[in-house]
Image (spheres, helix red, strand yellow):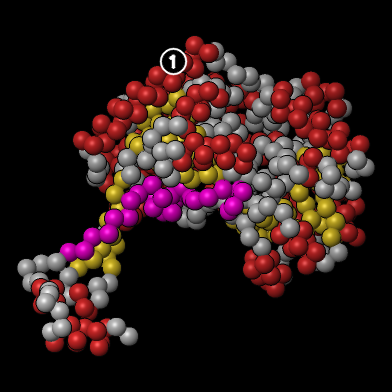
Amino acid sequence: MANNLYTAADDQQEMTVIDEALLRQKQAFSQDPYLSAQTRINDLTKLKLAILEHQDKLVQALSKDFGCRSVDDSKMGDLLPTIMGINYSIKHIKKWMKPSKRHVGLLFQPAKAFVMYQPLGVVGIITPWNYPLFLSLGPLTTALSAGNRAMIKMSEFTPATNEVIKTLLRGIFSNDKVALINGGPDVAMHFTAQAFDHLIFTGSTRVGKIVMASAAKNLTPVTLELGGKSPTIIDDKVNIREAVSRFILGKTLNAGQTCVAPDYILCPSGRIDELKQAIDKQFTKMYPCVANNNDYGSMINETQLQRLSLWLSDAKAKGAIVTPLGNDSEQECIAVGKIPLTLVNNVNDDMILMQEEIFGPVLPIVSYEKLDDAIKYINDRPRPLALYLCSHDKTTQQTVLERTHTGGVCLNDAAMHVAQDDMPFGGIGPSGMGHYHGHEGFLTLSKAKSVFKKGKINTASNAFPPYGKLVHKFIYKFFLK
């Protein structure tokens, strides 16, 4: 499992790189502040081809950083959405860049009004460790689509992946267009303190508050992709086995180390045993063994492994029923840094795992009597990044959509809304703010500049002082109402 390999000297060097790269990027942007659509498309095409060329090295590096990470998890969770996002942006850039015509009121005619979308400048991107490719090059795709330059701070916990991405980027971009930064927490703090034109952070709510406070000193606008406890509601009428098939991949992909993974299940009280049996059966079918199975990933490092182990011990001590799934012993799994999908029921709010985002293969089950109770349970807690509902009843679907607040929703699926390029993705309140996917991302990283244009005829001169003329009376009579 990966550990921080960067020394204090390494960190100091990276801070110097930050200062120099930001200065160079700002200078380069001032010399070429509005890149053509074709230049942006060319940049994204080069990025796509470089990713495809390096995909085997990327997959190998990701597995090295995690200790064990499924090739398919890396392809589905990192490579595929990154490439799909690039393809989508390439297809739509010219349309997004077109000025948007706006209405001009009769009083101000003859004139034209439009909004042009101008690049912001230099975008800072802070990447977490769980999906280091998608969460670095995904935001980069949006930044380049909008005509910006970018600096990316990678996680210290994915050094092997960082080096492959750095080599990939150096082969196609100069440092004054795209710069990649390594290093530990001190480097990250130095990074957030820079006067970027926009800052994108993906990570925990706790760190998000620190990032936002640091960015505020420069009035740097931020997009925060945070997390939280994303619930899954099981309808009382839905087939349990089918419901499990809809959410289980979202929970087991990358061993649950996903910000939009189902964090806990809300299940009708009379169906909990049925749910547990169905999850057990499906999980064992997907992963006949865990410890020696390359399809099932490890926790990223010892810290994360110990965190979840302590939380499970805390839950047991407070009365929870803990059920590890699969055919391996706990010792076999721990030896290779793995935790099998573990069900926890009979939970309460005193347990740490019911207070914090789990971010791993532990799945609490909370019972409810009526749908209103499940909705109240969600609404009594901080607004989550995602909500999932397993129900084919249209009334139930509409009720949940209208009465809950969350960053995004999947009906009869889990986590896959993130991969829909034509939809915004982002949190609300403690789970984040803003969007950087697709068209909404382009708008986030562009300045929507209002332009009011008049030609040779200037009717406004008729309203010049001295006031009290007939034209003033006419204006007030017909427009001040």
**Quadrant of residue 71 in the image?**
top right
SS type, badge 1? helix
77 or 369: nearer the viewer? 369
**Quadrant of residue 85 in the image?**
top left
**Quadrant of residue 234 in the image?**
bottom right
Q: Residue at x 45, y 24 (%)?
A: 181
Q: Is 305 situated above or below 222?
A: above
- 184 sits to left or right of 446: right
Is residue 437 highlighted in magenta?
yes
From this viewpoint, is residue 294 visible? no
The residue wearing badge 1 is 13
- 477 sits to left or right of 343: left
377 or 254: nearer the viewer? 377
Residue 271: x and y in percent read 88, 58
106 or 116: nearer the viewer? 106
- 379 sits to left or right of 139: right
Is residue 45 highlighted in magenta?
no
Q: Which residues are magenta?
A: 428-453
Residue 336: x and y in percent read 75, 22
Q: Residue at x 58, y 31 (%)?
A: 129
